[in-house]
Image (spheres, grey):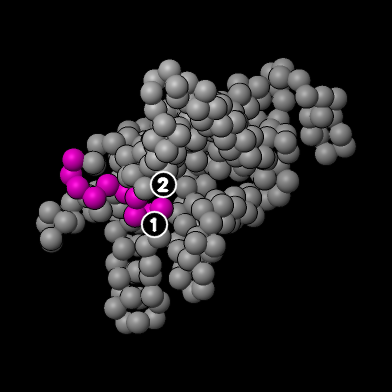
Amino acid sequence: MQDDSGEDTSGTWREGKYVRWQDVFLPVQAMLTWLGLLLLAMTIALAAKDTFGASKGEIARLYSDLTTNGTATQLFTASFDIVGIFYVWRVARRVAKDALVARFGAIRWGVFLMALAGGVCLALLTMYMTSQLAAHSLVQFHVTKAEREIVPHSPSGLPLGLLCGALIVPFAEEFYFRGVLLSWLSRKMAAPLAIAASAAVFALLHMRLVTHPGLEGWVITATIAFVGTVAATLATLTRSLWGPFAIHAGYNATLFGVAALYPVLFG
């Protein structure tokens, strides 16, 4: 059945349905599922500690690596996004072909490569602007512990960093923000407003206003929102998520590449 706004309230998974308001809360579902799996793994590890001869302290140190070890942090983040992809895929499988503003439909290679180059340029522009703001003492930027751990610090860590941060994470986030969320918003408001709203949610959920209080957080959030606006606009124009994915992948790959190669080139 549908309510007066056209929302599907039946809870079925039949083809032909639009993105529902419940689908907007997919990240929460993914987070709860992932945390449930993590708690299950911890329970099994504790139950089996006597069998394998591991102490509680050793198991605790293993799980503490999720926040102190770069490789573990990257794998932790990627695994969460993989769970999120599963939930978004369920929505994409359920709704009608035209219910999503954009899917992973084919686009021209030229468009994809231009979007990839655009993502690289956006990342370089971001680094230049932040360096200028810091150099002129207009904004003081800090790097949190989590941000420091999630990026590779040497060329040897770059392949895993690119796999997790420039492929899995952009795929999951574009599938949700420019797929599910933008599609739902587009049914509620005009396209420009939907693009702006999806970009705002995309930026706010990165939580930089919490991890970087003050003007620093607003500058970083505005930068993320701008990238989200460009990606959402491209998704609306091409009705494909490959362009936004290329922008996002190029952006993240540039940041990760600079972080990994900077000690070698300028150390």
Question: For this rendering, which residue is in front, 75 or 237?
Answer: 75
Which secondary structure dominates the residues rendered in magenta?
helix
Q: Residue 97: x and y, percent?
A: 61, 24
Q: Which residue is mark 2?
A: 67
Question: For this rendering, which residue is in front, 247 or 107?
Answer: 247
Looking at the rendered structure, the kind of residue marked 1 is Lys
Crowd class of label 1 (few under 14; some 14 to 19; many from 20; radius 10 Å): few
Q: Residue 25: x and y, percent?
A: 67, 40
Q: Horizontally, is 123 left or right of 171 in the view?
A: left
Look at the picture and state if 142 lies above or below 68: below
CA gap between label 1 and label 2 equals: 8 Å
Q: Residue 72: x and y, percent?
A: 36, 38
Q: Which residues are magenta?
A: 146-156
Quadrant of the rendering where the N terminus is positioned: top right
SS for callout 2: helix
**35 part of magenta stretch:** no
Picture residue at 71% right of the left edge, 30% below the top: 18
Crowd class of label 2 (few under 14; some 14 to 19; many from 20; radius 10 Å): some
